[in-house]
Image (cartoon, grey):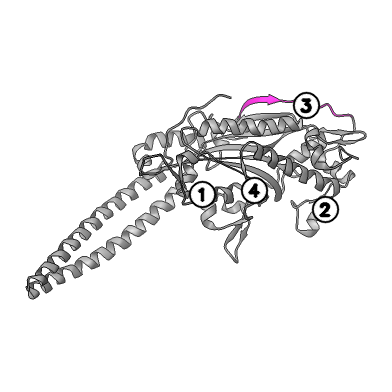
């Protein structure tokens, strides 16, 4: 992995789109976005909007001129002439109302199209269509050689009464596991340890709401892109969070920070809720794919000149968590076809599941540049400057628990029981160094 210098880009504002049409289309092809008509429609609508704005300004200026003239005429006693001029303003008022209505419609049309355009990927993002084309950055740890008769985590969970998947189906439905006894304790230990490690690294702990409104989901780019993936509480028009990134980042919506206050670093533990629509037919055994799961998140608000350095630091931080747990892992850079709608650059962390003989994703660490902050109106002001600038946002899983739990159970199983990693011993309580 290498340091990436600041990439100066105010993402997907109208001026940037107008001035860089070809560059945007070329780079969005990396994300398999091939809809140049959408970009051209935005530019055409913006031309229409600009024309309406010019006409509105001209008519408003004429209205102001006539109003001053009317006042002067009344003041000089020329009442009849003043009333004649007043009649002229009636038609201008009507035209202004029409212009303002059309301008509002035009603004809405432009915004409706803008939210359909994904973030432009960083120039270093490799081309590719799917996760098969992701670029491996490095490997770490040793893959364990399990003894004959070793079990996958869903069988271990049943053997040691750690997680009850059938009970979750009874209470709620598939994908809502119930953790019990030492399984619940291990889950709690992981959450506490992740939070402690994050706060020691300078992240302020946040305990946010588990539901958000439309404005919050829009601000982070989850609406309209991931509307079908979120659980919608229709009676109150709220959304169950798929990640703590949404409520934590929205703390700073419509906020202007001072440059000297950057970076802002937050961490949060929350349950997360995902419908996982379209995932049927994939490997959904045990904890591999669930609808409710626990996750600890890290979020940064950073100066644009430092956001890629911050990304590397976040990657290093997450890597050390996995190293301390003793899990074999790999880091991959996502190709354009696997990159999310909102991300400019993403690294995924995967741990190796020895019993399943496969890699399991446990974290994504991403730089969104100014894509989210443009939606959130999250800005910062340099000392002595009047005009605020858009900040950059980053976030990462630190870590998502289901597949970490799965890998721990599988990789550390022995004939005598499941060994608990040493870093978790203080969190498990006396005598709980092994599940047996």
Residue identifier under label 4: 278
Decide which of tag 4 and tag 1 comes sooner along the chain: 1
The mark closer to the camera, 4 or 1, is 1
Q: Quadrant of the C terminus?
A: top right
Judge left or right: residue 271 versus residue 264: right
Cα separation, mark 3 vs mark 1, equals: 42 Å
Q: Any mark on residue 166, and which?
A: 2
Residue identifier under label 1: 252
Marks 3 and 2 in Cβ contact (< 8 Å): no
Decide which of tag 1 and tag 2 comes sooner along the chain: 2
Asked if the stretch drawn in magenta spans residue 137, the answer is yes
The mark closer to the camera, 3 or 2, is 3
Q: Residue 324: percent from the left, percent from the top?
A: 74, 31
Judge left or right: residue 74 versus residue 270: left
Q: Residue at x 93, y 35 (%)?
A: 416
Cα separation, mark 4 vs mark 1, equals: 32 Å
Asked if the stretch drawn in magenta spans residue 122, the answer is no
Q: Residue at x 60, y 34 (%)?
A: 314
Cα separation, mark 3 vs mark 2, equals: 31 Å
Q: Secondary structure at mark 3?
A: loop
Magenta span: 135-147
Decide which of tag 3 and tag 1 comes sooner along the chain: 3
Q: Secondary structure at mark 2?
A: helix
| Vertical position of residue 235 compared to residue 193: above or below | below
Decide which of tag 3 and tag 2 comes sooner along the chain: 3
Cα separation, mark 1 vs mark 2, equals: 41 Å
Local crowd at mark 4 within 10 Å, few (<14), some, or many (≥20)? few
């Amino acid at each position: 992995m290498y340091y990436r210098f600041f990439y100066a880009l105010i993402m997907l504002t109208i001026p940037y789109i107008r001035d860089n049409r070809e560059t945007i289309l070329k780079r969005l092809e990396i994300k398999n976005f091939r809809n140049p008509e959408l970009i051209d429609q935005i530019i055409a609508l913006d031309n229409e909007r600009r024309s309406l704005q010019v006409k509105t300004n001209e008519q408003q200026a004429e209205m102001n001129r006539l109003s001053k003239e009317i006042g002067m005429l009344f003041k000089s006693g020329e009442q009849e002439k003043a009333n004649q001029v007043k009649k002229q303003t009636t038609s201008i008022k009507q035209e202004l109302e029409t212009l303002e209505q059309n301008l509002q419609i035009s603004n809405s049309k432009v915004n409706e199209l803008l939210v359909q355009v994904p973030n432009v990927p960083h120039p270093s993002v490799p081309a590719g269509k799917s996760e098969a084309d992701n670029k491996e950055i490095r490997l770490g740890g040793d893959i364990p050689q399990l003894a004959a008769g070793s079990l996958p985590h869903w069988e271990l969970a049943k053997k040691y009464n750690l997680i009850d998947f059938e009970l979750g189906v009874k209470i709620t439905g598939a994908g809502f596991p119930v953790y019990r006894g030492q399984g619940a304790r291990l889950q709690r230990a992981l959450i506490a340890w992740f939070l402690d490690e994050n706060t020691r690294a300078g992240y302020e702990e946040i305990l946010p709401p588990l539901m958000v409104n439309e404005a919050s989901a829009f601000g982070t780019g989850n609406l309209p892109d991931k509307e079908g993936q979120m659980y919608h509480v229709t009676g109150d028009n709220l959304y169950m969070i798929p990640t703590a990134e949404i409520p934590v980042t929205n703390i700073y919506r419509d906020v202007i920070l001072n440059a000297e206050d950057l970076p802002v670093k937050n961490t949060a533990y929350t349950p997360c809720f995902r419908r996982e629509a379209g995932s049927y037919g994939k490997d959904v055994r045990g904890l591999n794919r669930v609808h409710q799961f626990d996750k600890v998140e890290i979020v940064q608000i950073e100066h644009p000149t430092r956001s890629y350095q911050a990304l590397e630091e976040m990657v290093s931080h997450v890597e050390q968590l996995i190293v301390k747990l003793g899990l074999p892992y790999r880091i991959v850079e996502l190709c354009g076809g696997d990159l999310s709608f909102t991300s400019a650059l993403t690294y995924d962390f995967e741990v190796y599941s020895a019993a399943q003989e496969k890699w399991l994703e446990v974290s994504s660490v991403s730089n969104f540049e100014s894509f989210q902050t443009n939606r959130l109106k999250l800005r910062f002001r340099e000392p002595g400057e009047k005009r605020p600038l858009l900040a950059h946002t980053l976030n990462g899983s630190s870590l998502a628990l289901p597949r970490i739990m799965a890998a721990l159970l599988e990789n550390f199983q022995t004939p005598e029981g499941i060994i608990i990693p040493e870093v978790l011993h203080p969190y498990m309580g006396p005598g709980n160094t092994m599940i047996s």
